[in-house]
Image: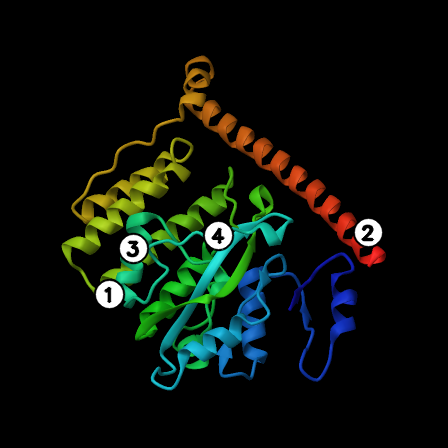
Amino acid sequence: MDDGSTDRTLAIARRFESAQLRVVTQKNQGAAAARNTAFSLSQGDYIQHLDADDLMAPDKIAKQMEALGTSATSRTLLSCSWGRFMYRYYRTEFTPSALWCDLSPVEWLIRKMQFNLYMQTSTWLVSRELAEKAGPWDTSLMVDDDGEYFCRVLLACDRVQFVPEAKVYYRTSGPASLSYIGHSDRKRVALLRSMDLHIQYIRSLEDSQRVREACVTYLQNWVCFFYPDRPDLVKKVEEIARGLGGNLALPTLSWKAVWLSRLFGRQRAKRAQVILARIKWSSGRLWDKILFQIDGRRFRQSWVRS
C-alpha cells in the first residue's frame, strides 16, 4: 500500500508484483487511511499489518497459526515477541513484559495502562471477524491511531493468545517516527482524544476500582506530553483523573534539565530536553549504521573468499 510516496518507492515495489502480491497506490492520506484501503482490498481470513520500516520473521505468521490450533476461535487475538533495532536487526534484544502472556482483554488493557506498556503493531495477527467488528482505523488521529484501533480489536476478542516463538523486529525511528509528538499541538490534541477513548473502552468492559486506578496511572504517565505548553489540555487530563477518583502530580524535569529551568524557565528547559534527546538518538543511529555497513563488508568479503 503506497500512500502517495514522492520517491521511487512505488516503482521499486511494483517489481515484486505477482499473483500473490498486489501493489496499490493512493493520494497521501496518512497511515490510518492506507491501512483502511488495504483492508478493503484484502481477501484473507487473517490480517497482518506491517509498516515499511519494520521487519517480520519469515515464520512469524506460520508460528502463530500453528499455535492457534483447533481449539481457538476466530475471536482469538494473537500477539508475539518483539524487539527494537536501528540498522543491525540481528542484534535485536527481545525483552519480555507483563503483556507477554495469554490474557483476557480487560487484563491486557489494565496492564498496558498500569505499567505503561504496549505491543508493537506488527505483532498482532487479527482474524477478519475481529477486524470487521472493530471497524476502520480512525483517520482523524494523527498519533496513537494504532493504540486506539487495537483497543477496539481487544473489545471484540474473547482472549489474547501470546506466541513467544513468533518474532517481530521494530525499527526505532526516533523523531522521524509518525508517533513522535515533539511540539505539535495537533498531535497533542489527537493524543488526548485517544487517551480519553482508551479509558472509555476499558470501562465499558469493567468499571472496577482497579480499572479506575490503572486509568489514573495511565493519565499520570502521559500528562508530561501536555505540560507545561498546553495548560488547557493539562486541565482536561486533571478533570478526567478526578472523574476517576484520582489526582495527578505535575511532571518533574530530569536532573539534567533542572539547572536549565533555573536559568531559562521551565518551558525552554523542556524544549532543551527534547533537543538533547534528539541529538543523543541521532548519534546512536549514525553509529549503528556505520557498524551495520562494516558488518556488511565483512560478510561480503568472507562470502567471496569462500
Give the side of residue 224 with respect to residue 207, left or right: right
Residue 124 place in picture, x, y as percent: 46, 67
Which mark identifies residue 98? Answer: none
Quadrant of the snapshot with the N terminus: bottom right
Q: Reading the chain from its start, which is encountered first: label 3 or label 1?
A: 3
Residue at x 35%, y 38% (from the top left corner)? 232
- For mark 3, what is the residue? 111
Q: How many marks?
A: 4
* Front tag of 2 and 1: 2
Q: Reading the chain from its start, which is encountered first: label 4 or label 1?
A: 4
Residue at x 40%, y 60% (from the top left corner)? 148
Local secondary structure at mark 3: helix
Q: Are marks 3 and 4 in contact (CB under 8 Å)?
A: no
Q: Amino acid at mark 1?
A: Ser
- For mark 2, what is the residue? 301
- For mark 4, what is the residue? 143
Mark 1 is surrounded, within 10 Å at the Cα level, by few (under 14), some (14 to 19) or many (20 or more) other residues, namely few
Image position of 289 with respect to 39: above or below: above
Q: Reading the chain from its start, which is encountered first: label 2 or label 4?
A: 4
Q: Reading the chain from its start, which is encountered first: label 3 or label 2?
A: 3
Q: Using the image as rendered, state which of residue 259 and residue 184 is in the foreground.
A: 259
Q: Amino acid at mark 4?
A: Val
- For mark 1, what is the residue? 204
Local secondary structure at mark 4: loop
